[in-house]
Amino acid sequence: MKHYYITFRSVTFAQRGERVLNRAGIHCTLLRTPKWMEDQGCGYSLRVWTNDIAAVMVVLRGEKVLLRKVYSQNTDGTLEEMAI
């Protein structure tokens, strides 16, 4: 499985995303977004382990969970922003 980071504007949106994904059986962890990943101040992220990020996005969009960006973790540990 691959790691992805989904960033949110606030803890409220991130918590809602966490609840929605957990109900859908998708494992995720809520955490503070590192400052270098966040261009507009503080924020929160979900770290998701999945082989199908598209399915995760369908679940979040289906529940109208507002998110900012999605990052994919490469095998060398670096993160790359994905087009969503």
Image: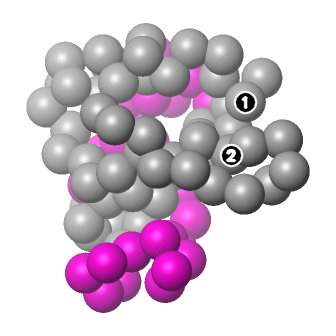
Asked which quadrant contains residue 11, the reply is bottom left
Between residues 75 and 45, which one lies in front from this camera angle? 75
Q: Examine the rendered structure and indicate whether residue 25 appears above or below residue 4.
A: above
Residue 2 forms part of the magenta stretch: no
Q: Secondary structure at mark 1?
A: strand
Q: Which residue is mark 1?
A: 2
Residue 39 forms part of the magenta stretch: yes
Q: Position of residue 3 (x, y in %)?
A: 69, 39
**Residue 38 tag number:** none
Q: Position of residue 52 (x, y in %)?
A: 56, 14
Answer with left or right where residue 31 lies relative to residue 43: right
Outermost residue to the right: 76
Q: Examine the rendered structure and indicate whether residue 1 appears above or below residue 19.
A: above
Q: Examine the rendered structure and indicate whether residue 55 appears above or below residue 81.
A: above
Distance from the alpha carbon under mark 2 to that under mark 1: 7 Å
Q: Examine the rendered structure and indicate whether residue 10 appears above or below residue 53.
A: below
Q: Which residue is mark 2?
A: 73
Between residues 16 and 8, which one lies in front from this camera angle? 8
Q: Please name the residue shown 18% across and 45% down the image.
A: 66
Q: Residues within 10 Å of mark 2 (few under 14, many from 20)?
A: some
Give, as a three-letter code, the residue at label 1.
Lys
Q: Quadrant of the N terminus?
A: top right
Provide the residue span drawn in magenta.
Answer: 13-42
Give, as a three-letter code, the residue at label 2.
Gln
Q: Secondary structure at mark 2?
A: strand
Asked which quadrant contains residue 72, the reply is top right
